[in-house]
Amino acid sequence: MCDILKMTHQRTIALDLDSVLADVMLIWLEEYNFKFNTTIKKHDLSQWHLHNILPLPEKYIQDLFTQVWKNRWKDIPPTNNDLSIVTSLLQKAGFRISIITKRDRATMSFVAQWLDLHNICFNELIFIFDNASKTCYPFFLLVDDSPINAVEVLYPRRIVVFDQPWNKILVNYPRIRKLNELFYLI
Ligand SMILES: [Mg+2]
């Protein structure tokens, strides 16, 4: 790897989008509860594979997720109201920010608009449409809520788990509840 590329990788922090920046499951649950007349809360979602705890096929769960991004993206709150400041400060500290998100292609433009709406600072936005691992992309540290993505990140790269009810199983990883806690870890 050429030196300039290596230096770039060593300064790049990768951020997941769903449930790290965008608290999308709050709106997903609003839709789910409305459709099925239930009162499920986010803290009830204790497993990553929702089809194991909800009586729905995986495809339906994913389709509802896509519908939320297409139709209710403006309602999706950020995980905290300081994301613009935090991402700006990370860049000012010399880090590159790469947002890496796996998703249905139909949601791309809404994601871009959501990031603009919340003034989130980043250097690149990577959409993954297939089963490629996030570890295929350059970063030295990844913030993610997915237990599957977390275990794929191997030393010397670092994983920081973004605390969510569905990743409590990950007990041996650094964990943050808000993005600004990242400053204590870098
Ligand atoms: Mg996520």
Image (cartoon, grey):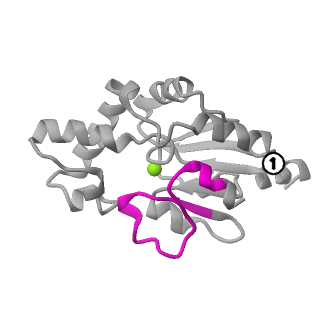
Residue 4 location in percent, x, y? 89, 48
Does the magenta portion include 176? yes
> Considering the image in quadrants, where does the N terminus appear?
bottom right
Answer yes or no: is residue 133 visible: no
Q: Residue at x 42, y 30 (%)?
A: 107
- What percent of the width, then of the height, locates residue 135? 61, 58
Specify start and end residues of the magenta stretch as a single range: 159-182
Q: Is residue 112 above or below residue 185?
A: above
As helix, strand or loop, the secondary structure at mark 1 comes to: helix
Q: Which residue is mark 1?
A: 8
Q: Residue furthest left?
A: 37
Q: Is residue 49 left or right of residue 176?
A: left
Q: Residue at x 46, y 40 (%)?
A: 22
Residue 120: within the magenta? no
Badge 1: few (under 14), some or many (20 or more) residues near its Cα, within 10 Å? some
Is 85 situated above or below 100?
Answer: above
